[in-house]
Image (tube, rainbow, N blue to C red):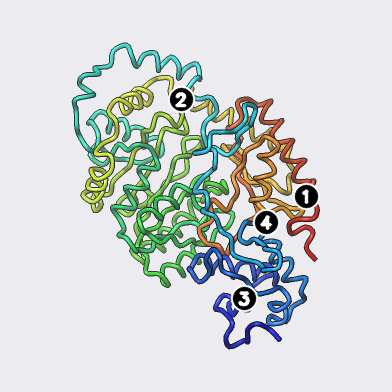
């Protein structure tokens, strides 16, 4: 006799029938959705495998495979003689190496999207030396202007002009990097409890900010170009959301680039539903021919975010935000409520970099290094598992041979290589992706990158240790 009847089965069990795909994955997805909605929580006991199999009219091997998959993903734990329980620890909100700095000395960390040795590029080093020669430090330390000093904002407008954005200093706000720009846009364009749309895989910094600020992120299905217009239209109608965050150029982590036609389609959907677009455009500089930003196609519907972190290094912490006039006041309130202003000292450094005659040489060096590392990845990793673009700082590796993303990341760390599981980027648990992101520029040099990628290839081919995980499930 089963422990529950159809009429009294928990909601998550009844929902399994509505989930498409293989039955073992339908069970997993139903549990993940129940965790997201709060219908299941850590410590809850799952039905015995035989009982659940009978209830669902499936082979017990199917349920065993589902439970093994959840064990691999860290969702459940088994207690001898007591059954299987939800065992969800607090999830990382980004690559673990951002806060755990205990990696061994020879660890090759490919979990970061930071430029390769950019602060010591010869031309950049020359500019850095110049910073200390004639900077009016007392004036910079004494000034308190929220959106930034006028000549710093002019430099931001000059940087954006390279991507076709025509604006004046009055349209630009200096921010403490791209992440700060996203926080300001969230605060200015939405309120606690609001639904905010984004790609189904999104930058973990946006997820953290939305969670902290009480906004509900809803993921929109993607294809090879990024956001899918038809799905965006459906989600807009169903949710009534008024804000969309997206990365249309070298999307992180998929490297998707929207064509101009796709951008126009997305824009038409946003106009139809009166959606404001927050455009995260930190990678456009690396393309030989920049993509056309939404901020060019419809300036008053778009908050445009960019940064110099990918050019010179993350420590500079200076970015720029182009403000549509309708959001200017709200963005100013958000700025004064967070940092009051970005550091004028850092903004001065950024201004001198942008106005330097050497900026083009620095960008070209970054482009060449990115392409060289992509060539190493293409020559080392299986083509059928690798998805990327020649210009991108990162790639994504589709996992096969029974690997789950979390298990692969843990095993790679044990062998001295850091990667990032796609679970960190997932906005909706119904679209679980067994893949990892590999930041090719995270290695200190090309030789160590090749060494790390060979390790990842061998690990991929081996599959997870026998006796555990999905690969051994009936």
What residue does disc 4 label? 72
Front disc: 4 or 3:
4
Front disc: 2 or 1:
1
What residue does disc 3 label? 16
| Sequence-earlier tag: 1 or 3 | 3
Quadrant for the C terminus, please. Answer: bottom right
Taking depth in this image into account, of 112 and 79 the one nearest to the observer is 79
**Relative to 301, residue 50 above or below:** below
Front disc: 4 or 2:
4
Residue 392 screen position, x and y as percent: 57, 39
Taking depth in this image into account, of 272 and 192 the one nearest to the observer is 192
Is residue 436 in view from this perspective?
yes
The residue sitting at 61% across, 35% down in the picture is: 440
| Sequence-earlier tag: 2 or 3 | 3
Pointer 4 local density, CA inside 10 Å: few below 14, some 14–19, many at least 20: many
Front disc: 2 or 3:
3
Question: Alpha-carbon distance for marks 2 and 1?
Answer: 48 Å
- Marker disc for residue 162: none
| Numbered disc 4: secondary structure | helix
Residue 97 screen position, x and y as percent: 54, 38
| Numbered disc 3: secondary structure | helix
| Sequence-earlier tag: 4 or 3 | 3
Question: Alpha-carbon distance for marks 1 and 4?
Answer: 11 Å
Taking depth in this image into account, of 354 and 75 the one nearest to the observer is 75
- Marker disc for residue 360: 2
């Amino acid at each position: 006799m089963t422990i529950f009847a159809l009429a009294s089965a928990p909601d998550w069990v009844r929902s399994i029938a509505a989930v498409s795909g293989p039955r073992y994955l339908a069970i997993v997805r139903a549990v993940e959705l129940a965790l997201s909605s709060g219908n299941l929580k850590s410590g809850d006991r799952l039905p015995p495998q035989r009982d659940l199999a009978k209830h669902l009219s499936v082979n017990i091997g199917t349920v065993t495979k589902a439970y093994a998959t959840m064990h691999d993903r860290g969702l459940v734990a088994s207690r001898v003689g007591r059954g299987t329980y939800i065992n969800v620890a607090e999830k990382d909100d980004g690559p673990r190496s951002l806060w755990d700095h205990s990696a061994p000395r020879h660890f090759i960390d490919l979990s970061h999207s930071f430029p390769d040795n950019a602060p010591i590029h010869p031309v950049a080093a020359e500019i850095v030396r110049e910073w200390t020669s004639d900077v009016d430090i007392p004036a910079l330390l004494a000034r308190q202007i929220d959106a930034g000093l006028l000549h710093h904002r002019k430099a931001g407008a000059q940087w954006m002009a390279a991507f076709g954005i025509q604006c004046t200093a009055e349209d630009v706000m200096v921010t403490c990097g791209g992440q700060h720009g996203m926080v300001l846009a969230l605060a200015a364009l939405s309120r606690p409890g609001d639904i905010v749309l984004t790609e189904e895989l999104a930058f973990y910094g946006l997820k953290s900010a939305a969670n902290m600020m009480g906004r509900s992120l809803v993921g929109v299905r993607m294809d090879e170009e990024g956001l899918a217009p038809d799905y965006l239209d459906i989600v807009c109608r169903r949710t009534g959301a008024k804000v969309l965050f997206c990365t249309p150029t070298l999307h992180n982590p998929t490297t998707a680039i929207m064509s101009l036609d796709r951008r126009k389609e997305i824009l038409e959907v946003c106009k139809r539903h009166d959606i404001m677009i927050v455009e995260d455009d930190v990678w456009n500089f690396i393309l030989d021919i920049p993509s056309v930003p939404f901020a060019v196609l419809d300036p008053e519907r778009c908050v445009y975010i960019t940064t110099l972190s990918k050019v010179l290094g993350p420590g500079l912490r200076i970015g720029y935000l182009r403000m549509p006039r309708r959001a200017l006041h709200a963005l100013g309130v958000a700025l004064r409520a967070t940092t009051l202003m970005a550091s004028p000292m850092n903004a001065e450094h950024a201004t001198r970099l942008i106005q330097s005659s050497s900026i083009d040489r620095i960008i070209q060096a970054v482009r060449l290094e990115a392409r060289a590392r992509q060539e190493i990845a293409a020559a080392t990793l299986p083509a059928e598992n690798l998805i990327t673009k020649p210009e991108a700082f990162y790639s994504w590796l589709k996992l096969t041979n029974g690997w789950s993303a979390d298990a692969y990341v843990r095993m790679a760390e044990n062998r001295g290589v850091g990667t990032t599981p796609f679970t960190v980027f997932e906005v909706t648990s119904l679209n679980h992706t067994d893949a990892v992101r590999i930041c090719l520029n995270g290695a200190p040099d090309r030789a160590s990158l090749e060494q790390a990628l060979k390790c990842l290839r061998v690990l991929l081919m081996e599959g997870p240790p026998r006796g555990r995980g999905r690969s051994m499930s009936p």
